[in-house]
Amino acid sequence: MSSTDDRPLTLTYSPCPNDTFVFHAWTHGLLPGTPDVTVDYADIDVTNGRAERGEGDLLKVSYAVLPYVRDEYALLPCGGALGRGCGPLVLTAEGGATSPAGLAGRTVAVPSERSTAYLLFRLWAADLVPGGVGEVVVLPFAEIMPAVRDGRVDAGLVIHEARFTFQAYGLRRLADMGEYWETTTGHPIPLGAIVGRRSLGGERLAAVAEAIRSSVDHAWADPSASRKHVLAHAQEMDPAVADAHIGLYVNEYTRDLGVSGHAAIDALLGRAAAAGLVPATAPLSPAG
């Protein structure tokens, strides 16, 4: 693919409220002069796999997958999910483990083995679960809480709107990976990144970044414009939960990672590499 290729770009992200809110204006033709784009919706485990196989121009992926895809994809400085108080949760059912040590040798469901959530969980478990957990089962994130509730797994690592809905399943929070990360490092927590194929060229990737920032600005200036679209993709999610989801995951880092955002990502990948959990990778810069 050449940098002069002017076909519509492919963009893949989740149907979760934060993503549909952020990209609505750009993907619905509300921003004249921005690059043409076609959209595909997929769960994070799917987008991570596509990035590793080099499938697609622009994708929302887990920060944990960056060391595996950086040769082909560049990190864009906007559009992702990074912040404070928004980390994945470890949930158990009544009668289940009540402390990290109680997960030793137990079965835990996770949303993706390449997810940032799972990477954080592995760092947390190495510190606090003697001998480690037992079997790890990968499930689509929407299936994890029912699996914990029904006793098919001993605990579940959940993301997205599960922060707001787990009590409806009769579950309780055993640990917050965001609290663990922020307490031990002082950094905000990196969750999801937008990456673009390097072969698109620097000029085109810069235009994409500008389109994303404009889309975020439009969404903040007129939240009602994306409301119908967001709720349609949120399916049965309560509108109040969708609003809380957007409020938590769309923040100043969505518009621009900045110095502190890039430092948080470097800290995560550096710590994970030191623990042998991901390949070592060069420190990030706003350009890469």
Image: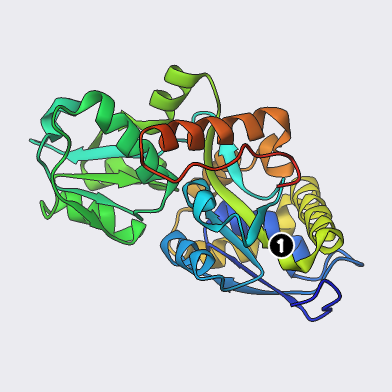
Name the residue at 45% across, 57% down. Answer: 237
Which image quarter is the N terminus in? bottom right
| Label 1 SS | helix
**Is 31 on the left or on the right of 183, as rendered?**
right
Rendering coords of residue 168 (x, y %): 28, 45
**Is 95 on the left or on the right of 235, as rendered?**
left
Give the residue number, with chain letter if any, for mark 1.
Answer: 198
Rendering coords of residue 171 (x, y %): 22, 40
* Amino acid type for the residue under numbered disc 1: Arg
Above or below, 112 relative to 81: below
Rendering coords of residue 210 (x, y %): 83, 53
Q: Nearer the viewer, residue 117 or 28?
A: 117
Above or below, 93 relative to 67: above
Q: Nearer the viewer, residue 178 or 31?
A: 178
Name the residue at 53% across, 62% down. Answer: 14
Residue 121 can be seen in this image? yes
